Amino acid sequence: MININKLCKSFDNRKILENISFSVVKGECVFILGKSGVGKSVLLKNIVGLVLPDSGTITVGEIKVDAQRPEELSLIRQRCGLVFQFPALLDSVTVFENICFGLRARGLLTSQVEIAARVKEKLKLVGLSEVVLDQMPTELSFGTQKRVSIARTLAVEPEYLLFDEPTTGMDPIATAGLNQLIKNLTVKLGVTSIVVSHDIKSALAVGTRIILLEDGGIVFDGKPGEFKSSSITLAQEFQMGFGYHA
Amino acid sequence: MPSLSFLSTVGGMILFTWDCVLLTLQRKTKWHQVLDQIFQVGVRSLGLTVAAGLFVGAIMALQIDLQLKDFGAEAFLGGLSTSTTLRNIGPVLIAFLLSGKVGAYTSAELGTMEVTDQLNAIRLLGASPLEYIILPRIWAVVISSFLLLIVGLMVTIFGGIIFAEVIGVNSLNYIQNIPRIVTVWSIVLSVIKSFLFGAIIAVVSCYKGYHAKGGSVGVGIAVQSCAVTNLILIIITDFLLSMASSCLQDIFKVGYL
Ligand SMILES: Nc1ncnc2c1ncn2[C@@H]1O[C@H](COP(=O)(O)OP(=O)(O)O)[C@@H](O)[C@H]1O
Ligand SMILES: [Mg+2]
């Protein structure tokens, strides 16, 4: 379970997140919606301790996110994978080395055969062929880079998955495949996921719960069915495609 | 206050350097990556450094010749121009050049990695960007800047000799005069300066890139501030070292230090 309690964060006196509180229990797939710049990425980075809150607490499982305790933070980061909004692949090494980076850094698998098998397994999950393994990230299209980035996060098999706009910049077929993947991970493997997205269709189809952010706070938190019939203006705008600035 | 923020930058850079020194002592440096980076940043700057060295040597020979002519002291040209170049102008000018070429490249590359979350990705995957990305670059820039400065300085001597011939000073006389004025200490001083300037360029560029934030605008700011900080620190260090060497000269009475 991920628990966020009264989280506040500002940058240069500009309040981004104000008093955000919610919990995500095991097996949930929560979609977080909100206009660009509302602080969705900042929220996800807070959960893995890449951005530190001004006040409030976050716990992942039983562990509190605390920058003063590097060992615990490292454990949280191992259990809780984050797929960044940018692909954030390392430019200087091949796709293969990118995907197995976490396995090697954490010493999770030591045999080369096992590492190669794991890399190929995750590559298949994101719908890519093994041809890309020897290529450099800059040779790939943006959508492909993003899928490699997802494979890299999946490679260490985290219990919690945080996706930051996973389908932005992908074609409709890849989007459908990825939605299916997120659903499978949640339903079959019991992974808990938080997905930041602009894609209302995916949210309604895949999410078990939707949270809507506006002006630093939560304005809606409920089931997709409730979201559809919500009277909140922003919720309606999202469904009609108004007021949506990607 | 700009001066306050400059001081806090310097403080931050000292801590940053200390972290890197500790990591190096713990033998965390991946030397094959250092070699890769030396090729990336160092070898590619060789041509430029050699060209600049030739011109710096030539300019100094020309300028000093103009001054010496008034006193009919052209015989001292070789020693004086080589000494001034080695001790001061050469290291400073070549370091400026490298701070543009190597420093801008490194700070832009690291800044882009930071603002596109590449460094965060490394943190999440359980590695340290300081160890994996920064340390090899710091050493590569220190080593290649140092070597380039030494090469550049040797080339300035040739530049002087060639240009002396052009302006009608016998090159044999020019060369024979060099050891009269250029002492071992001049050479030691220029080697120390080269090393420190290389270290400044490395630390400033890596620090500025590593601390970039806020998208492509942030990278622009980081590169700009890297360039300015490099120039200021190189000038200040040059001044302090020149002061120190002249004090030592007074204390030990050993001629030119
Ligand atoms: N490291 C940072 N320093 C300063 N401002 C930041 C930083 N990270 C994010 N911001 C600002 O916080 C706001 C929210 O950003 P973000 O979470 O990326 O928005 P989004 O909801 O589109 O993901 C933006 O205005 C952004 O400029
Ligand atoms: Mg975002």
Image (cartoon, grey):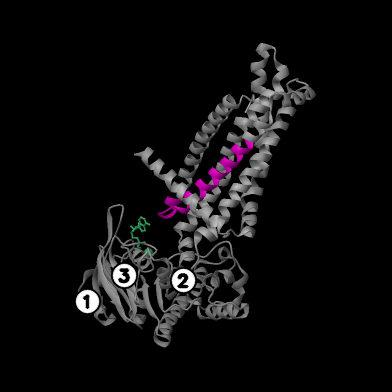
Q: Which mark is residue A46?
A: none
Q: What residue type is labelled 2?
A: Met
| Extreme residue toward the front, this view | B252
Instruction: State the quadrant of the C terminus of chain B.
Output: top right
Tell whether circle 1 marks a residue whose Cβ is less than 8 angstroms from ligand 1.
no
Q: How crowded is mark 3: few (under 14 residues within 10 Å), some or many (20 or more)?
A: many
- Dot placed on the residue nearer the N-terminal end, 3 or 2: 3
Q: What element carries label 1?
A: loop
Q: What residue type is labelled 3?
A: Ile
Tell me the residue at 36%/71% (across/down): A196
In this rendering, which labeled residue sits more in front, label 3 or label 2? 3
Q: Residues within 10 Å of mark 2 (few under 14, many from 20)?
A: some
C-alpha span from label 3 to label 2: 31 Å
Looking at the rendering, the quadrant in which ligand 2 lies is bottom left
- Dot placed on the residue nearer the N-terminal end, 2 or 1: 2
Along the viewing direction, whichever of A82 and A204 lies nearer the viewer = A82
Tell me the residue at 36%/81% (across/down): A206
Query: In the rendered image of this protein, does residue A73 appear above or below residue B205?
Result: below
The magenta-colored residue range is B190-219
Q: Which mark is residue A230?
A: 1
Residue occupied by mark 3:
A58
Q: Residue A170 carries which label?
A: 2
Q: Mark 3 lies on which chain?
A: A
Q: How crowded is mark 1: few (under 14 residues within 10 Å), some or many (20 or more)?
A: some
Query: In the rendered image of this protein, does residue A221 appear above or below residue A10?
Result: below
Residue B27 appears in the rendering: yes
